[in-house]
């Protein structure tokens, strides 16, 4: 598979967040269930939280005791069905290596991430590769055949009225 997106990250856990954001850019209709299937819990068994992904509301209860999820508005993922989802913040070197290898099947590659300095906030950015253009949300409209059917029905009614008055 030709890689479509490269993730540049600062900090291991922010790079993992960038990987999942890249997946969502490539799959804008993905749901929470799709995310859990695409990035299963066994990628990060040492996460210290019950799931890799949780709704922001559920993640908030875990973050009260200790910051376990990326739950700030600029960190969350918006699913295709409108849910706001948080990703686990805890990524050991072993788990990080797993998600990097796993992301390759989706055409996502990782540039060497930079370690952050103490007190510095990490982050990530995405680069589109090989002419890749992310899909845009397709506007849901009325299918062409419904318009055709409506025209035929209107024409039939008009013809009936026309011939009935003669």
Image (spheres, rainbow, N blue to C red):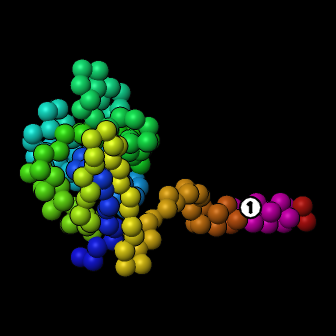
Q: Residue at x 24, y 46 (%)?
A: 13
- Residue 125 position by quadrant: bottom left
Name the dominant secondary structure of the magenta segment.
helix
Measuring from the top left, give residue 14's x and y in whole percent: 29, 48
Total label count? Answer: 1
Is residue 106 shown to the viewer in this render? no
Measuring from the top left, give residue 11's x and y in whole percent: 26, 50
**In the displayed structure, would residue 15 be above or below residue 78?**
below
| Residue closest to the eye, 146 or 1 | 1
- Report the residue marked by disc 1: 154
| Residue closest to the eye, 125 or 20 | 125
Highlighted magenta segment, given as a residue range: 153-164
- Residue 160 position by quadrant: bottom right
Membership of 146 in magenta stretch? no
Find the residue positioned furthest to the right: 166
Find the residue positioned furthest to the front: 118
- Image side of residue 62 versus residue 163, left or right: left
- Image side of residue 14 versus residue 92, left or right: right
Q: Quadrant of the C terminus?
A: bottom right
- Residue 150 position by quadrant: bottom right
| Residue closest to the eye, 71 or 120 | 120
**In the displayed structure, would residue 39 be above or below residue 60?**
below
Q: Residue at x 17, y 44 (%)?
A: 91
Measuring from the top left, give residue 5's x and y in whole percent: 34, 67
Q: Quadrant of the N terminus?
A: bottom left
């Amino acid at each position: 598979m030709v890689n479509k997106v490269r993730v540049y990250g600062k900090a291991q856990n922010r790079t993992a967040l960038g990987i999942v954001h890249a997946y969502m850019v490539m799959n804008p209709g993905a749901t929470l269930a799709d995310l859990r299937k695409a990035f299963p819990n066994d990628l990060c068994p040492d996460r210290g939280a019950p799931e890799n992904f949780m709704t922001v509301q559920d993640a908030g209860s875990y973050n009260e005791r200790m910051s376990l999820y990326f739950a700030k508005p600029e960190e969350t993922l918006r699913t295709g069905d409108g849910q706001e989802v948080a990703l686990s913040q805890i990524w050991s070197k072993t788990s990080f290596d797993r998600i990097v290898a796993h992301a390759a099947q989706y055409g996502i590659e990782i540039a060497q991430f930079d370690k952050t300095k103490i007190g510095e906030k990490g982050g990530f950015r995405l680069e589109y590769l090989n002419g890749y253009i992310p899909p845009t949300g397709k506007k849901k409209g009325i299918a062409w055949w419904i318009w055709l059917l409506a025209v035929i029905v209107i024409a039939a009614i008009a013809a009936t009225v026309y011939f009935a008055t003669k």
